Image: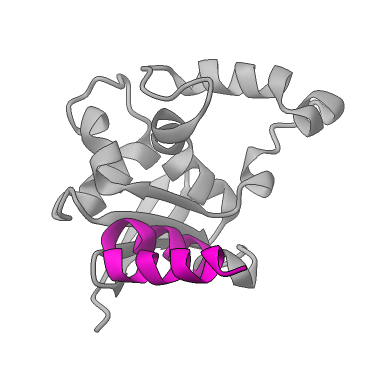
Amino acid sequence: MVFGFGQVFKQNSTFFAMWLYEVCKGVHCVYTRTLEHQAALFCRPTEHHESIEFAGKIFSFEQYRSWFMHAYPKAKETGVFVYPTEFRAFNIPVSALDRFYNFEFNPLSQEEIDLLYMCQHLPKEDYLIGVSVRSDATDGRHEVAHGLKHTNPEYWAEVEEVLNSL
């Protein structure tokens, strides 16, 4: 069963639409129209959750962007913040948003506020994925697999069994 929640947000005279729906039990998808909007929603929560450089740390978007421009080869080479095109889909546990809800990240961007508002009712043990209309066709399936790994022990046991047999 799929549940939907859609919201349209106006920012700087541009309208951004995003939808939240449950893909499968405990795995929820935030679906957007652009890669740039998707990256703006998920950049800091994702990097706070799993980045080698920023995991567990409080940081501004400007601090992350500055680090990325110097550390990521394609950004360094081109001088362009290529994060939205290099990272087309995202996955985090809902609990990764806790420090954002507690306003430890201050200020929050409008996109982060929108994400928090949209996800406020989700159980902390659930998983959140993000894909865009412009994400690759396989991105959604890949992110759902991450979600299933964390929310469905039977699924992960079967995956490990197959992998161990290779």
Residue at image location 44% in from the left, 56% down from the top: 130
Q: Residue 13 location, x and y as percent? A: 47, 46
Going by the picture, which residue comes out furthest to the bottom?
1
Is 160 one of the magenta-colored residues? yes
* Front-lying residue, 123 or 116: 123
Please say which color scheme the image uses.
one colour
Write down the region rendered in magenta: 141-166
Residue ID at (62%, 72%): 137
- In this view, 30 is above or below 109: below
Residue in the image at 23% along x and 56% along y: 126
Q: Main secondary structure of the magenta part?
A: helix
In this view, the residue in front, 64 or 164, is 164
Place of residue 30 in the rendered image (x, y in percent of width and height, measured from the top left): 38, 60
In the shown orientation, is residue 132 left or right of residue 111? right
**In the displayed structure image, the side of residue 126 where residue 90 appears, left or right:** right
Residue 19 shows up from this direction? no
Pinpoint residue 144: horizontal percent, then vertical percent: 43, 66
Is residue 116 visible in the rendered image? The answer is yes
Q: Which of 126 and 121 is in front in this view?
A: 126
| Residue 159 x, y percent position in the rendering | 46, 68
Q: Residue furthest front?
A: 165
Which corner quadrant of the image does residue 146 belong to?
bottom left
Image quadrant holding the N terminus, namely bottom left
Q: Nearer the viewer, residue 13 or 128?
A: 128
Q: Is residue 126 magenta?
A: no
The quarter in which the C terminus is drawn is bottom right
